[in-house]
């Protein structure tokens, strides 16, 4: 699967900002057919970072991925690269 089709857009909510600061996580809206492995590979390829964990969640017709980055990759750096911060 093409990484740019897997990841649709980042979520910028109060909860996502809090998770970014406290748990080194970002939340993305992803393709409904994407697996955790697809999301893992897409994030590592697009942002050139190391991913520690991926959790997926379906809510209100959207599939979301909670991505925890490794200790050497602060989530705030990825958020800045995306223009969220």
Image (cartoon, grey):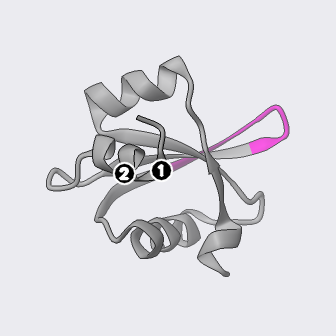
Task: Say above or below: 12 vs 29.
Answer: above
Pick out the residue farthest to the right: 61
Pick out the residue farthest to the left: 72
Q: Estimate how packed mark 1 is, as few (under 14), some (14 to 19) or many (20 or more) residues with alpha carbons within 10 Å.
A: few
Residue 9, position as x, y percentages in the image: 64, 50
Please give left or right for residue 35 compared with residue 37 in the image. Answer: right
Tell me the residue at 66%/67% (across/down).
6
Name the one closer to the observer, 36 or 50. Answer: 50
Tell me the residue at 57%/72% (across/down).
38
Please give left or right for residue 64 compared with residue 42 in the image. Answer: right
Residue 23, position as x, y percentages in the image: 29, 32
Query: What is the C-alpha distance between the residues marked 2 and 1?
Result: 6 Å
Is 34 included in the stretch rendered in magenta?
no
Task: Say above or below: 40 vs 83.
Answer: below
Q: Estimate how packed mark 2 is, as few (under 14), some (14 to 19) or many (20 or more) residues with alpha carbons within 10 Å.
A: some
- What predominant SS class does the magenta segment belong to? strand
- Check the picture and name the quadrant holding the C terminus: top left
Q: Secondary structure at mark 2?
A: helix
Name the one closer to the observer, 31 or 75. Answer: 75
Tell me the residue at 34%/71% (across/down).
48
- Check the picture and name the quadrant holding the N terminus: bottom right
Q: Which residues are magenta?
A: 55-62
Q: Secondary structure at mark 1?
A: helix
Please give left or right for residue 49 compared with residue 44 in the image. Answer: left
Name the one closer to the observer, 55 or 8. Answer: 8
Which of the 4 image quadrants contains residue 53? bottom left
Residue 78, label in figure: 2
Residue 57, position as x, y percentages in the image: 64, 41
Answer yes or no: do the residues labelled 2 and 1 have beta carbons within 8 Å? yes
Residue 37, label in figure: none
In the rendered image, which residue does mark 1 sit on? 82
């Amino acid at each position: 699967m093409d990484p740019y089709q897997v990841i649709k857009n980042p979520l910028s909510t109060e909860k996502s900002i809090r998770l970014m600061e406290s748990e080194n996580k970002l939340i993305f809206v992803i393709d409904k057919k994407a697996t955790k492995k697809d999301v893992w590979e897409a994030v590592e390829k697009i942002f050139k970072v190391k991913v520690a964990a991926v959790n997926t969640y379906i809510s209100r017709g959207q599939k979301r991925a909670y991505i925890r980055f490794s200790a050497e990759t602060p989530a705030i750096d990825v958020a800045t690269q995306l223009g969220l911060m």
